[in-house]
Image: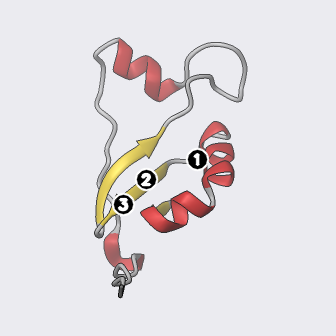
Amino acid sequence: MNVNMHEAKTRLSALVDAAERGETVVISRNGEPAVMLVPIHSSAGPGWSKEMRAWLEGGEAVDLRVDRSNLKPPRRRVF
């Protein structure tokens, strides 16, 4: 799931729930991926999530490339 910063601020609880269920949640800033939500504990049981375990063990990097074909351009703020 890819969301922009504004959507992430308004839906943070739902995004955290999705990440805890194992869904990949990427938050973009200005159309570019900025961060990925990764659960500390897996919803499958106690212990580290697969992504966190791989990161801690220096294993494979997580592929953060984002399919930008479905991203909307950011709205411009008018003050």
Instruction: Name the residue located 37 percent from the left edge and 46 percent from the top edge.
Output: 35
Image spot of residue 33 (x, y percent):
31, 56
Q: Amino acid at mark 2?
A: Val
Image spot of residue 70 (x, y percent):
42, 78
Q: CA distance from mark 1 to mark 2?
A: 10 Å
**Label 3 close to label 2 by CB (< 8 Å):** yes
What residue did someone put label 3 on?
28
Q: CA distance from mark 3 to mark 1?
A: 16 Å
Instruction: Name the residue located 68 percent from the left edge and 53 percent from the top edge.
Output: 14
Instruction: Name the residue located 59 percent from the left edge and 43 percent from the top edge.
Output: 19
Please tell me whether residue 22 is drawn above or below residue 78 in the rendered image: above
Dot 1 surroundings within 10 Å: few (below 14), some, or many (20 or more)?
some
On-image quarter of the C terminus = bottom left
Q: CA distance from mark 3 to mark 2?
A: 6 Å
**Which label sits in the foreground, 1 or 2?**
2
**Quadrant of res 31:** bottom left
What residue did someone put label 2 on?
26
The reply, left or right, for residue 14 in relation to residue 48 is right
Q: Earlier in the sequence, mark 3 or mark 1?
A: 1
Q: Amino acid at mark 1?
A: Glu
The reply, left or right, for residue 45 in relation to residue 33 is right
**Quadrant of res 65:** bottom left
Image spot of residue 45 (x, y percent):
72, 19
Instruction: Name the residue located 58 percent from the left edge and 47 percent from the top edge.
Output: 23
Residue 23: which disc?
A: 1
* Residue at the outermost bottom position: 78
